[in-house]
Amino acid sequence: GQNIDQPTEMTATEGAIVQINCTYQTSGFNGLFWYQQHAGEAPTFLSYNVLDGLEEKGRFSSFLSRSKGYSYLLLKELQMKDSASYLCALYSGAGSYQLTFGKGTKLSVIP
Amino acid sequence: GAGVSQSPRYKVAKRGQDVALRCDPISGHVSLFWYQQALGQGPEFLTYFQNEAQLDKSGLPSDRFFAERPEGSVSTLKIQRTQQEDSAVYLCASSLHLGARQPQHFGDGTRLSIL
């Protein structure tokens, strides 16, 4: 089985940097995805990590440590439009192709 | 189309009625997934298809739930004899292929309310 933990809510100031953590326990692992979801909208793909290390994509970066069962999403130069839920999702592979999502972290960006 | 399209966006039904939810994936995407998302929760897997073949339906909560993709493109999720606990957002996602490096692209979902 799989168990994924994320903080429920976070608040950060416009222009600042915020780190959203995700810890997981799983019997099989082939990748970790981060999605952004605004209320009432589709989850939007942000990044994925298959190997340990940091993946950078503009203002967003994602880090993975497979040995520690840990990932984080780093958002820089926060903008008001970054207020959304951020979902961490595991991909197990090996015949199990679905994503297993955490409950999501609701980020509020304040002026 | 440019993205995954789902219809209807909102559906209200009385308990006991049957409903059908449609998903039109991104053109050329082989894989199609259905998820259920309750309020304040992450999406939960229901089933997925590779072309017209339903490879995994282990997430379907009961035999009242049925999904099909007869021509390997558009998919329909059908719920028979709806119950109040079926109220949720139903999300469809597609990906070019199966695999760890293939992100799933989601539609806006159908918000189903059972009265």
Image (cartoon, rainbow, N blue to C red):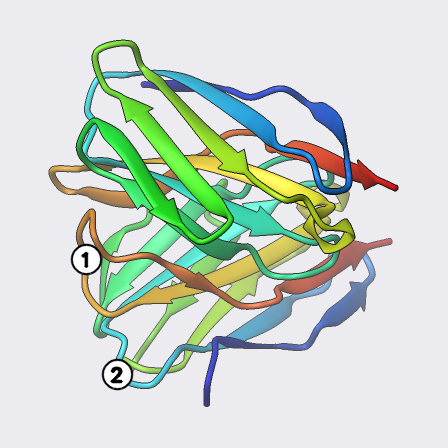
The answer for which chain carries disc 1 is: B
Q: Position of residue B50 (x, y in %)?
A: 21, 66
The reply to whether residue B58 is visible in this rendering is no
Q: Considering the numbered disc 2 on the image, is that residue within a helix, a strand or a loop?
A: loop
Which of the 4 image quarters holds residue A95?
A: top left
Residue at 78%, 51% in the rendered image = A80
Camera-side residue: A29 or B8?
Answer: A29
Horizontally, residue B109 falls left or right of residue B4, namely right
> Which residue lies under the disc numbered 1?
B98
> Which of the two discs, 1 and 2, labels the residue nearer the N terminus?
2
Of residue B86 and residue B41, the one placed in the foreground of this image is B41
Provide residue A87's location: percent of width, then percent of height. Answer: 53, 38
* Residue neighbourhood size for the residue with mark 2, other residues' Cα within 10 Å, grouped as few (<14), some (14–19), many (≥20): few
What residue is disc 2 on? B28
Q: Give the alpha-carbon distance from disc 1 to disc 2, as whole Å.
A: 13 Å
Q: Nearer the viewer, residue B71 or A22?
A: A22
* Picture residue at 47% right of the left edge, 79% below the top: B3
Q: Amino acid at mark 1?
A: Leu
User: Is B2 drawn above or below residue B76 in the view shown?
Assistant: below
Furthest residue toward bottom: B1
Residue B62 sits above or below residue B2 on the image = above
**Rendered location of residue A25, percent (x, y):** 34, 13
